[in-house]
Structure formats: structure tokens, C-alpha cells
């Protein structure tokens, strides 16, 4: 991801595909200097549009540490629905951590936000 005006690197966004199941797992990282500026939400919305319209996915989901509310707020702002918490699901630096999961189905996305606007973000 790059900032539109300055073309500076702001972060990464990815969609890991499971083609047989027509689903994708969102992953993203935003540089700390760019937190709270809407870049993550904008990128996730664009990737949702791409995943559903171009890749014809049925479901897109994402996970975040429960200790990282900024990450799951990005998911909520992009229209994903909270699906549950997996307790002590990952070990990091010698400690176990809970993960929250959010997801969105294609038909929910079609009702929820303007695909054209999100698709335009991919090309601007």
C-alpha cells in the first residue's frame, strides 16, 4: 500500500486464497505512523471488492489478536461480522494469545457497500 499523494509505503494487504472452497483470508499490516488514518479500511474494502467481483469468492475472513482493537476495528469498518474468538489459538514470544475472527459472505457484501467506489480505489 502507498499513500496516494506522497507515494510513500504505508503497509501491506494480502488475500490468501483457498480456491476449492472459494474463500480468502485477509491479512494486513499498517505502519505505525499511518494508524488511524483510514488506510487499512480503504485497502480492505478494495480487496473485498476484488475478491468478490473478480475472484468470485464466496467468503472472506480475517483474524486479529484480541489485544489489537485497531485491527478488528478495520474489519468492522469494512463490513465484516464478528464470528467468534479462538482462545489461546497462537503462541507468540512464549505466550498464548486469543484471536478474534471476522467474516463476510459475498451476498452480504453486495448489500453492504459500493463496489464501484472500492474498485476505483484499486486503480487510483
Image (tube, rainbow, N blue to C red):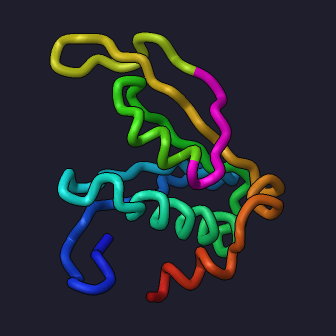
Magenta stretch encompasses residue 121: no
Depth check: give the residue in front, 119 or 54.
Answer: 119
Quick check: 41 above or below 63? below
Residue 38, percent from left and from top? 41, 61
Q: Quadrant of the C terminus?
A: bottom left
Position of 67 with respect to 21 (left or right) is left
Q: Is residue 63 left or right of residue 92?
A: right
Which residue is depicted at the point 21% across and 71% down?
9
Q: Is residue 5 left or right of residue 79?
A: left
Vertically, is 8 above or below 106?
A: below
Is 58 left, or right, of 123 in this rendering?
Answer: right
Q: Residue at x 54, y 70 (%)?
A: 46
Q: Is residue 31 visible?
A: yes
Where does residue 105 sit, x and y in percent of width and height? Answer: 75, 49
When the figure is inspected, residue 112 is found, relative to residue 46, above or below; the finding is: above
Q: Count of labels shown? A: 0
List x then y, in percent, for residue 4.
Answer: 32, 83
Where residue 49 sits, quadrant-wise, is bottom right
Residue drawn where x is 82% and y is 60% of the image: 111
Residue 20: in sight, yes or no?
no
Q: Residue at x 51, y 80 (%)?
A: 121
Q: Position of residue 123 (x, y in %)?
A: 48, 87
Q: Which residues are magenta?
A: 77-84
- Quadrant for the N terminus, please: bottom left
Amino acid at each position: 500500500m502507498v499513500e496516494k499523494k506522497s507515494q510513500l509505503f504505508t503497509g501491506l494487504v494480502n488475500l490468501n486464497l483457498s480456491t476449492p472452497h472459494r474463500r480468502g483470508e485477509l491479512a494486513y499490516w499498517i505502519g505505525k505512523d499511518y494508524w488511524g488514518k483510514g488506510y487499512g479500511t480503504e485497502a480492505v474494502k478494495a480487496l473485498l471488492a476484488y475478491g468478490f467481483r473478480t475472484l468470485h469468492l464466496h467468503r472472506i475472513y480475517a483474524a486479529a489478536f484480541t489485544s489489537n482493537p485497531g485491527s478488528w476495528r478495520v474489519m468492522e469498518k469494512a463490513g465484516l461480522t464478528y464470528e467468534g474468538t479462538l482462545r489461546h489459538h497462537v503462541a507468540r514470544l512464549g505466550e498464548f494469545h486469543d484471536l478474534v475472527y471476522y467474516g463476510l459472505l459475498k451476498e452480504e457484501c453486495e448489500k453492504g457497500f459500493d463496489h464501484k467506489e472500492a474498485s476505483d480505489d484499486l486503480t487510483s
